[in-house]
Amino acid sequence: MAALGSPARTWRGLLRELRYLSAATGRPYRDTAAYRYLVKAFRAHRVTGEQLCRAQHELHFQAAAYLCLLRSVREHVALHREFHGQGERSVEESAGLVGLQLPRQPGGKGWEP
């Protein structure tokens, strides 16, 4: 994972991923348990002034890791949908995919006079 960036950027990324998930389920993302948990955690670990808080950095790291997981799963599903096989193909279809044709042999197997 690269540099963490700002907590606000991580927060916006998490909300974006929750919106993608809610679009798939048809349920508003603000009604999900994940959203309520994230709001509660980010508010609990908010830093004021120059206070240094190890828990805030730990929360930010965990949030960034969770964001990476959500984004990767979404991209994996999209790639899987696009490139997943359509089942067993015949030999003729497989040859056609790579631009080949099967030879036809007169008098060979399956040929009738």
Image: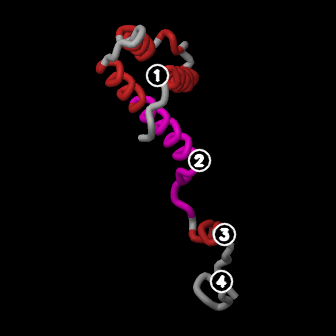
Quarter occupied by the N terminus: top left
In percent of the image, x 59 and y 68: which residue is there?
94
In the foreground, 76 or 84: 76
Task: Single out the mark in the foreground, 4 or 3.
Answer: 3
Q: Residue at x 57, y 70 (%)?
A: 91
Distance CA(mark 1)–CA(mark 4): 63 Å
Give the alpha-carbon distance from disc 3 to disc 1, as whole Å. 52 Å
Disc 2 element = helix
Tags 3 and 2 touching, CB below 8 Å: no
Residue located beneath label 4 in the image: 103
Number of the front mark, 3 or 2: 2
Task: Say whether disc 2 or disc 4 marks the residue closer to the N-terminus.
Answer: 2
Q: Is residue 33 visible?
A: no
Q: Quadrant of the C terminus?
A: bottom right
Q: Identify the amino acid type marked 1.
A: Pro
Whether 57 is drawn above or below 110: the answer is above
Mark 2 or mark 1, earlier in chain: 1
| Label whose residue precedes the other's in the sequence (3 or 2) | 2
Gap between marks 3 and 2 measured at Cα: 20 Å
Task: Name the residue tied to disc 3.
Answer: 96
Disc 2 to disc 4, how far (Cα)?
32 Å
Q: Which residue is mark 1?
A: 7
Is the magenta region chiefly helix, strand or loop? helix
Please give left or right for residue 31 compared with residue 41 in the image: right
In the image, which is nearer the foreground, mark 1 or mark 4? 1
Where's residue 41, x and y in %? 37, 13
What are the residue bounds of the magenta stretch?
66-89
Q: Which residue does the numbered mark 2 point to in the structure image?
A: 82
